[in-house]
Structures are given as C-alpha cells and as structure tokens.
Amino acid sequence: MSKKEEKVNLKEGFQGAAFGAMEGIVMMLGVIFGLSNIGDKRILLVGLLVAGLADAFANAAGMHVSEEAEVKNKKIYHKPKEVISSTVFCFIFTLLAVILLTIPIIMFRLNIALIVSAVVGLLCITCLGYYIGKIRKGKKLKLIFEYLIIAVIASVACYGLGIIAKLMII
C-alpha cells in the first residue's frame, strides 16, 4: 500500500471514528439522562448496554451504506478498503463511547454517576471539537461550542422525555 493510499484509509478511518464517537456520546448521554428518571440502576445499565450495542452496529451499518452510496461524477467515490476502514472505526469508537460512559454508572451511586458521565462525555466532545477544529484550521471554540450544544440539548430533551414517561407509568 502506498503512502497516499494509507493516508486516504486513515482519513476515512478518522471520519468513521469521529462519527462514531460523537454519535455514541450524544446517544449515551441521552439514554443515561432519559432512563435515570426511573431511579433503578439495573434498568439503566441494561438500557445502556442494549442501546449502546445496537447503536454501534447501526452506526457502522449506516456509515458503511453511506460510504458505498457516495458517488462523484457517476464514479465510485470510495474504494472497498476505505469503506471497511470507516465502518470498523465507526463501530469501535461508538462502542468505546458506550463503555466509557457506562463505567461511571457501574462504579458510583446514580446521582454521582450522572455527573461523572456528563463531565466525561462533555470533555470527550470538547476534545473532539478541538481536534476537528485544529484539522480544519478553523475556529476551534465555535466547533466545541456547537458540539456541546448538541449534546446538552439531546440530554435535556431525553431527560424531559424520561420525566414524562415516568409520569405516564405511575
């Protein structure tokens, strides 16, 4: 494999990794805050693991199909190795987000775990925004703020939905 091909594979891999990490963190924070309203740590853990694994597979499948569907000037845009690279990295980084944000739920009492998971998730999103801003040679703070807003809105919306669901069950 030439150095140029290797750079392309790494670029495609990074796109998959960035997608998987961002989506995985936002999804996990949403599930954590949505299901935390139930107050049962076991239900929260099962929900996180089931939703997280399903999300990792769904992200990888979506990335795979998206890469295969990308056509430029009626020609195939991505080589099979690029598609595989994006798919694998997307799966791995979504799964890493699941594991990373589930660990505090296992280790701490629920109220402490929520804070730790939120801080860890938002810190990871901040790092991702900084790194992508650095690569794009753009405004890092703007990207960080944009990514954080997405995560916070998703978390608050899911928390609110969890409250509504709990009220309907009782």
Image (cartoon, rainbow, N blue to C red):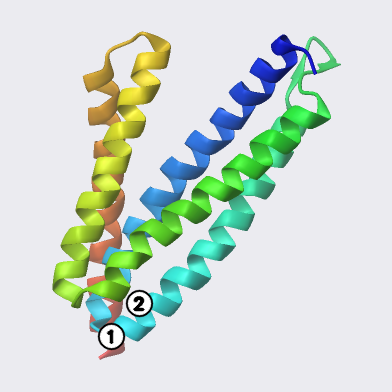
Q: Quadrant of the C terminus?
A: bottom left
Helix, strand or loop at mark 2: helix
x and y percent of residue 56 in the render? 57, 55
In the image, residue 2 above or below residue 98: above
Taking depth in this image into account, of 29 and 169 the one nearest to the observer is 29
User: Residue at (44%, 79%) from the top-left corner?
Assistant: 46
Q: Residue furthest bottom?
A: 170
- The relative height of residue 157 versus residue 73 in the rendered view (above or below) is below
Q: Quadrant of the N terminus?
A: top right
The circle on residue 157 is: none
- Quarter of the figure with residue 145: top left
* Residue that extends furthest to the right in the rendered view of this protein: 75
Residue 9, horizontal then vertical, whole percent? 68, 24
- The residue shown at (51%, 55%) is 95
As measured in the structure, the alpha-carbon distance from the residue carrying label 2 to the one carrying label 1 is 6 Å
- Looking at the image, which is closer to me, 158 or 26? 26
Residue 25 lies left or right of residue 115; in this view the side is right
Q: Is residue 69 visible?
A: no
Residue 5 percent across, percent down from the top left: 74, 16
Q: Where is residue 48 in the image (x, y as percent from the top left)?
A: 42, 69
Q: Label 2: few (<14), some or many (≥20) within 10 Å?
A: many
Q: Can residue 160 be seen in this view?
A: yes
Q: Which amino acid does label 1 sit on?
A: Asp
What residue did someone put label 2 on?
Answer: 44
Asked if disc 2 and disc 1 are in contact, CB closer than 8 Å, the reply is yes
Report the residue at 71% width, 31% height from top: 67
User: Disc 1 designates what residue?
Assistant: 40
